[in-house]
Structure formats: C-alpha cells, structure tokens
Image (cartoon, rainbow, N blue to C red):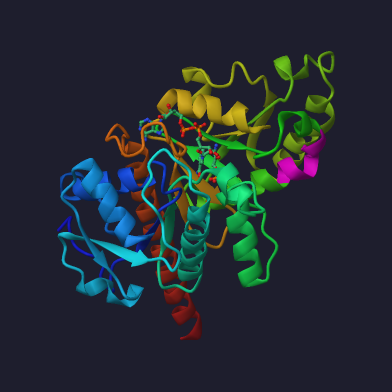
Amino acid sequence: MPSETAGPDSPILLVTVGEPSGVGPDVTLLAFRDRELLDLPPFVLLADPQMIRSRATRLGLDVTVHTLSSLADIASVPAAEMAVLPLVNKHVDTPGDLDPANAAGTIEAIDRATRLVLSGEAAAIVTNPIDKKALYDAGFAHPGHTEYLAELCGTLTDTSLQPVMLLTGPELSCVPVTIHIPLAEVPAALSTDLIVSTARIVINDLRERFGLETPRLAISGLNPHAGERGAIGGEDEAVIRPAVAMLQTEGFDVVGPLPGDTMFHPEARRRYDVALCMYHDQALIPAKTLAFDETVNVTLGLPIIRTSPDHGTAGDIAGTGAARPNSFIAALRLAARMAKIAGETAIDMESSDRDARV
Ligand SMILES: NC(=O)C1=CN([C@@H]2O[C@H](COP(=O)(O)OP(=O)(O)OC[C@H]3O[C@@H](n4cnc5c(N)ncnc54)[C@H](O)[C@@H]3O)[C@@H](O)[C@H]2O)C=CC1
Ligand SMILES: NCC(=O)COP(=O)(O)O
C-alpha cells in the first residue's frame, strides 16, 4: 500500500524542515498530501509541529500532524497522519520573513537527522533548503549542508571526509569540483589532486550507491575553449589534463578537459554519465536550466545518504501555495532508491560473511 507508515521493516526516511520561512514546509506538506496518488515512500519530518500545523492552515491543506515522542513510535502513526519528530528549538511561521530565532531549530534538525542515520535508526536524510546567510549570521561556520554533513559525519565517525555535490536529473548529472567559494578563488582552489579525489569519490559512489558499474565521466576545462591549448589560461593544461591522465591510467572511463560551452548539448550528454565541472555555476546552471523541477542534489563521499531538492528557500513564494514540490518529491524518491540499494548491499555482505564463516 502506498500510504503505509514507515514500520520497522521499511527504511525510515527523515526530512529536515530547512529554513522555516522558506518553501521547505510547503513542499513537504504538498508531497504528503499527494503521497498516495504519487506512490511516495513514507517519511518522518524533523520540525516544530506547531509551525507545520500553522503552515498547513495557511496553505489550506487538510494535513493532520502526528507528533512523535521518539522515532521508535513511528509504527503507531496512522497512515493518514504526517509523522513529525519535534525539535527542542521552536520555530515561528513567518513565510518570506527570516527570523534569526529560527536558526537553532534549523541546525538542530540537520544535526539530529544525521545522528539518527549514522546510528542506523533511519536510512537516509532529505534536507529542505536552508538560507545560508541566515545561518552564517547565527554562527553556522559551514558554507552549506554539503560541507556541514561531512564535518559532522567525520567527527562522529572519527574519519576525514571529502564531500562531493552531485546534481542529478533526467537530462544531466554533474558535479562542481569546487563548491561554495567565490569565483575569484576558484583557480587557486583547483588542483590535480582535488580533481582526482573528487572523480574517485564520484566513481565509487555511482557504483555503490547508484548501482552503475562502469561510470563514464566528462571533465570540463576551466577557461574558454578549455584554455585553447594554453593560449587562454593555463589551468586546463597544467592542472586538469594531468588529472584526466591519472584517472585514465587507473582504468577509469574519463575524458577531458572539455570546453564548458560545448559539453552540455544533447549529443554530448549522451557520451557520459556525470560531468565533472570546475566551479558551482558551471555545473548548476546547465542542471537547473535543463530540469529545475526534477533535479536532485545528492552529497557523495559520506557514510550516510543525503538528498535534497535542487532549489533554494524561495522566500518570495513561501506560504503562498505557488511552490512546486516536484524536486522535493524527486529527492524523496531518490533517497528511497539509494536506501534500497544500500539495504541490498548490506544483505549481500551479510550472506557472503555467512558463506565465509561456513
Ligand atoms: N540545499 C540548500 O539548502 C539550498 C539553499 N539555497 C539558499 O536559498 C536561498 C535563496 O536562493 P535563490 O538563489 O533565490 O534560489 P531559489 O531556488 O530559492 O529561488 C530562485 C527562484 O526559483 C523559484 N523557486 C524556487 N523553488 C521553487 C519551487 N519549489 N517551486 C516554484 N518556484 C520555485 C523562486 O520563487 C525564485 O523565483 C539562498 O539563501 C540560498 O543559499 C539555495 C540552493 C540550495
Ligand atoms: N546551490 C546548491 C546549494 O547551495 C546546495 O547547498 P547545500 O546546502 O546542499 O550544501
């Protein structure tokens, strides 16, 4: 049954509320309303239940919020009700108006969801968008979820993690090698090692998390025409080409550096699975232009599964009913699919362990 609650046998997907003055609550409520029609996987929202009730009323949505006392109570939630794991920090419902008091709850939701997935109590996180500047002003010392999740997971597992941002949609999947840094800092931040380590993480996670055995990567140049053989900027030959060569030597299906302006047309896109781009907008402009409503942001390189809609907080339309939940729904579905693949891999490993012991 599509509307089943997440019981002990189905992987629990956690959704973080994101910036409460943005569209996170709206798209979550809209997805919940349409869950049966769309056959969506069940999920638990980490949010202030009162704020979610208020947003539902504002949007005219007939959604009953069920406040959980702990995640273990999920099996007792009636299928018609939306399970919300309450935050310690309260949120006010002021769509479109940032309130600094909301920052603590927004961070709390991400933090608690991460810990619940790491501990094995839940299978994956779908994060709603945060207003980055609002969190910076509250002392959040990370550029975005991507970097924060890597640091948190790294601290909790005592490992050093390189997070990789993947934008994946029906038309294009791409990765920015440098993420949330000013454009002027990109050339100095790029290195052959960074490109190689990013590509290795992408290839590994495409295999392990997406079940794609032989991923094909296209690596972009940095400068116009990929540097025109050194005449328009030196990074393409000095930094990117050696990375491509190193990855090819390792046996990976990698091409590049390709000129950024000609690697995204339909015929070019058929030649690779993921485009590795040198900076944020080189990757995200084509991804959002081709499929703003269906593209999903996934963090690779983590010990947990994290997906997110590709859009931001959209404060201009929050609470109005204009937000489309499509990218959130795609993120929810992808998280469920990745959790299923992870579950199957775990079962495989358990059986091979058993075989080895026999
Ligand atoms: N994963 C995350 O936490 C992300 C957070 N952001 C944050 O979001 C804030 C706003 O960023 P913007 O650049 O303005 O991008 P945005 O995606 O919030 O909005 C851009 C335009 O798209 C529209 N839009 C966005 N989502 C929509 C939806 N679901 N349905 C219909 N229309 C939608 C908005 O109304 C706006 O006109 C920033 O603070 C940024 O840091 C941005 C991207 C991702
Ligand atoms: N533009 C993409 C974006 O900002 C996503 O950031 P993150 O919060 O997922 O790290």
* Coordinates of residue 249 in the picture (x, y in percent): 74, 42
In this orientation, which residue lies closer to the viewer: 344 or 239?
A: 239
Q: Is residue 193 magenta?
A: yes
Q: Is residue 340 magenta?
A: no
Q: Is residue 139 positioned above or below 354 on the image?
A: above
* Coordinates of residue 140 in the picture (x, y in percent): 63, 54
Q: Is residue 66 positioned above or below 167 on the image?
A: below
Look at 68% across and 28% down and name the residue there.
Answer: 256
Magenta stretch secondary structure, dominant: helix
Residue 162 located left or right of residue 9: right
Badge count: 0
Q: Is residue 82 positioned above or below 203 on the image?
A: below
In this orientation, which residue lies closer to the viewer: 346 or 14?
A: 14
Residue 135 located left or right of residue 354: right
* Coordinates of residue 28 in the picture (x, y in percent): 31, 48
Magenta residue span:
188-196
